Image: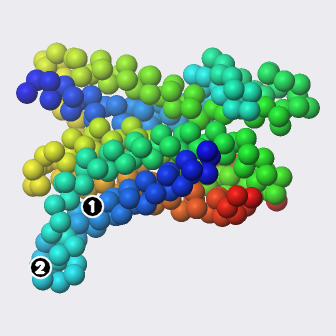
Amino acid sequence: MATTLLIIHGLVAVALLGATTHQTLATWIPTRTRPDSFVGRFRTVPSAAFANAIVLLYVASALLGAVVYLYFRVDVRPGLERGGHWPALGFFDIKEHFVSIGLALLPAYWICWQQPRGSELAPTRAALTTILSCIVWWSFLVGHIVNNIRGFGA
Amino acid sequence: MTSSLAFRRFAFVFGPAFAVLYVIALAYDLALFTVYPSLGIVLAGTHRSKDAVDPAMGFLAPAMYWYGWAATAALGALGFALAVALLPGRWSFRLWSGWVWVIPLAAMTACAYLTLPWFRLSP
């Protein structure tokens, strides 16, 4: 059960990582980029359309993570503590704090993406998108590192 | 229009309020409840493993506070954001929208700082 949930959590996280990275880069890449270049085509995706998907994927990933965390605390963390993997546990704690704060930012993030591109909320939208993207990247990498310390099914 | 404005106010207050309250809950260990996953029980408030089992057996009943910290912060932020959202228009005042990301960013830094003791433990 825990392994199945972990794999689903990982797959949702991959989708979220792709969506949020695409949206963040599209937000920051300057408009003067040649439209026929790879970067230009990358930028022209309707990034506002990603907002709903990102909110749904973030909530789904956080909920799955919250369930998997119960198994982690009982079955995995004691082994990491015995092995003295304190930095990994510290990074994991930072991940859980960041994810919580990111979850609370979703309503403001969603509202910002409902506004027209040139609105007064554009800088706030760019900042929130970047923060959420950093949280997702941090969580993804730390989750992988902690999972890989003991190895799959260990 | 009024409802969307109220929701916007709610959303722009909820995020920063949650971030601040989360840091306070983390710093002062103010978990709304404590989860003991191996025992399958949830106790109201913050409890240590030694409160539930003999201290020597603490490793058998690991306590989890993250859910409780998040619940504390969510409940407080919900109350605060609802109050601001329902505030009559004449009592509201305009704030810089950047606070919605500056405050959480500062809270994230504080969370990382509060996690530093993990990195001082020797292997």
* Mark 2 chain: A
Q: Residues within 10 Å of mark 2 (few under 14, many from 20)?
A: few
From this view, report whether residue B29 is shown above or below residue A144.
above
Which amino acid, by three-letter code, is at mark 1? Gln
Instruction: Answer with left or right where residue A64 lies relative to residue B26.
Output: left
**Residue drawn where x is 70% and y is 58% of the image:** A153
Q: Which residue is mark 2?
A: A35
**Residue drawn where x is 39% and y is 37% of the image:** A104
Marks 2 and 1: same chain? yes
Instruction: Answer with left or right where residue B76 lies relative to residue B41.
Output: left
Q: In what quadrant of the picture does the N terminus of chain B appear?
A: top left
- Helix, strand or loop at disc 1? helix
From this view, report whether residue B102 is shown above or below residue A24.
above
Residue A23, label in figure: 1
Pick whichever, A110 or A70, lies toward us: A70
**Residue drawn where x is 32% and y is 24% of the image:** B81
Residue A46, label in figure: none
Which amino acid, by three-letter code, is at mark 2? Pro
